[in-house]
């Protein structure tokens, strides 16, 4: 940003506003990884089923990994969590593996909350970890996998969504020795990765369930706020071309728009009903703002630049069960984009979950109790010939 034409007082005031807003916004992303936004008491305890505690955390290491743009990383670390055990059929092939993919700026931890485990992975749930071998990786640039904040900062390779899927596939096939997945289930960024899996590896799974995205390139308001975030960081002199020693207070304008969009209009209307409620909400969010790294954030949002699954939709062989949310302001049902796109998929189905009590817009993805029945339908469908 440039402030040369402003008075000193105006400039100082503006920077102060940006810094305060930045704290709020960064905390939004921090809380995104903890799946707590818009969580009402009605949906925080979705079931009495016990939480599956049999988790295994591991790291896969790949030497001299080369990204699609030619950049390399001496050692690429991919952190992942598994639930359950692999089952081998009569030919010795694992036949019960389910890959579950997280959203932007999250990690496997976001999908291991008590609500997620009770709704999806507990005994009797749609992806019951006593029946299925569940694989949940931290994508490159996220969680405990290799990322800019490990030390390389802006010298870290500039990955894209295609790189993410390449690395996920390398983890599944080379590190875990699985040649065929039963299913790929992904939310938001993971949703787009699921579409990419079906096109890049058409025979690698029985079905995919992309949740909360379009197969079309990111565009409209969803693209606009991302560009505001990226441009805000890169134009901030305190970013220092990624070599900062303290976290720079940038990216606020785009992320504040995202914060307003992500929960859905109805959810925010209930949560913020007065100036006092708004102030309390901001104070609560600001208090948790410390642990988001700016370079990690920048890379994560820039990585969507290469996504476009539309050209290959007619070539998808596997079953596709797409799920979107009626109050999702990122992927508005009124645009009818996914409705048109899914018609090009030979074995494609689409459901749009209606607005109900507890709906949280795009962030309904963090409350699987709201949509677990759709997952059950998908798993039943791909389990049939």
Image (tube, rainbow, N blue to C red):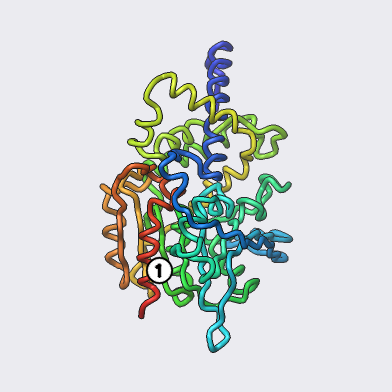
**Observer-nearest residue: 120 or 69?**
120
Residue drawn where x is 65% and y is 64% of the image: 66
Along the viewing direction, whichever of 73 and 23 lies nearer the viewer? 23
Image position of 17 (left or right of 195): right
Relative horizontal placement of residue 248, taking residue 222 as reference (left or right): right
Which quadrant would residue 149 be assigned to in this image? top right
Please identify the quarter of the rendering in which residue 341 is found.
bottom left
Is 158 rendered above or below residue 225? below
Q: Could you say where residue 231 lies in the image, as x and y percent from the top left? A: 52, 37
Does residue 235 sit above or below 46 in this rendering? above
Disc 1 designates what residue? 379
Q: Where in the figure is residue 311, as x and y percent of width and height?
A: 37, 64
Instruction: Return the x and y of residue 81 as percentages of the image width and height.
Output: 62, 61
Point out residue 236 in the picture as x, y percentages from the top left corner.
Answer: 59, 31
In terms of secondary structure, where does tag 1 sit?
A: helix
Q: Residue at x 37, y 36 (%)?
A: 267
Q: Identify the image quadrant of residue 178.
A: bottom right
Give the position of the N terminus as an image quadrant.
Answer: top right
Query: How many numbered marks does the figure carry?
Result: 1
> Mark 1 Cα within 10 Å, few/some/many (few <14, many 20+)?
many
- Report the residue at 46% width, 69% height from top: 183
């Amino acid at each position: 940003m440039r402030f040369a034409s402003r008075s000193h007082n105006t400039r100082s005031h503006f920077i102060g506003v940006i810094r305060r807003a930045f704290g709020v916004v960064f905390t939004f992303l921090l809380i995104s990884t903890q799946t707590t936004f818009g969580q009402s008491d009605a949906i925080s305890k979705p079931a009495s089923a016990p939480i599956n505690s049999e988790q295994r955390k591991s790291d896969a290491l790949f030497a001299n990994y080369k990204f699609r743009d030619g950049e390399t990383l001496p050692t690429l670390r991919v952190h992942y969590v598994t639930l359950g055990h692999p089952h081998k059929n009569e030919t010795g092939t694992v036949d019960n593996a389910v890959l579950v993919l997280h959203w932007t700026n999250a990690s496997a931890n976001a999908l291991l909350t008590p609500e997620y485990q009770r709704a999806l992975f507990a005994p009797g749930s749609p992806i019951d970890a006593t029946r299925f071998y569940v694989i949940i990786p931290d994508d490159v640039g996220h969680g405990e996998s290799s990322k800019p904040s490990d030390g390389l900062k802006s010298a870290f390779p500039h990955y894209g969504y295609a790189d993410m899927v390449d690395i996920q596939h390398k983890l599944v096939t080379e590190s875990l020795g699985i040649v065929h997945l039963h299913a790929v289930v992904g939310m938001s960024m993971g949703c787009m990765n699921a579409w990419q899996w079906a096109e890049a590896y058409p025979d690698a799974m029985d079905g995919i369930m992309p949740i909360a995205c379009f197969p079309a390139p990111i565009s409209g308001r969803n693209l606009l706020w991302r560009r505001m975030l990226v441009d805000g960081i890169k134009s901030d002199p305190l970013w220092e071309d990624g070599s900062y020693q303290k976290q720079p207070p940038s990216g606020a304008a785009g992320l504040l728009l995202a914060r307003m969009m992500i929960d859905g209009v109805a959810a925010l209307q209930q949560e913020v009903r007065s100036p006092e409620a708004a102030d309390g909400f901001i104070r609560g969010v600001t208090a948790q703002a410390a642990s988001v790294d700016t370079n990690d954030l920048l890379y994560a949002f820039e990585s969507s630049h290469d996504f476009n699954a539309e050209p290959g939709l007619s070539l998808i062989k596997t079953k596709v069960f797409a799920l979107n949310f009626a109050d999702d302001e990122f992927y508005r049902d009124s645009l009818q984009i996914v409705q048109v796109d899914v018609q090009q998929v030979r074995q494609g189905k689409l459901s749009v979950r209606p607005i109900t009590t507890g709906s949280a817009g795009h962030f309904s993805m963090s409350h699987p109790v709201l949509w677990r029945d759709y997952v059950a339908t998908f798993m039943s469908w791909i389990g049939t010939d």
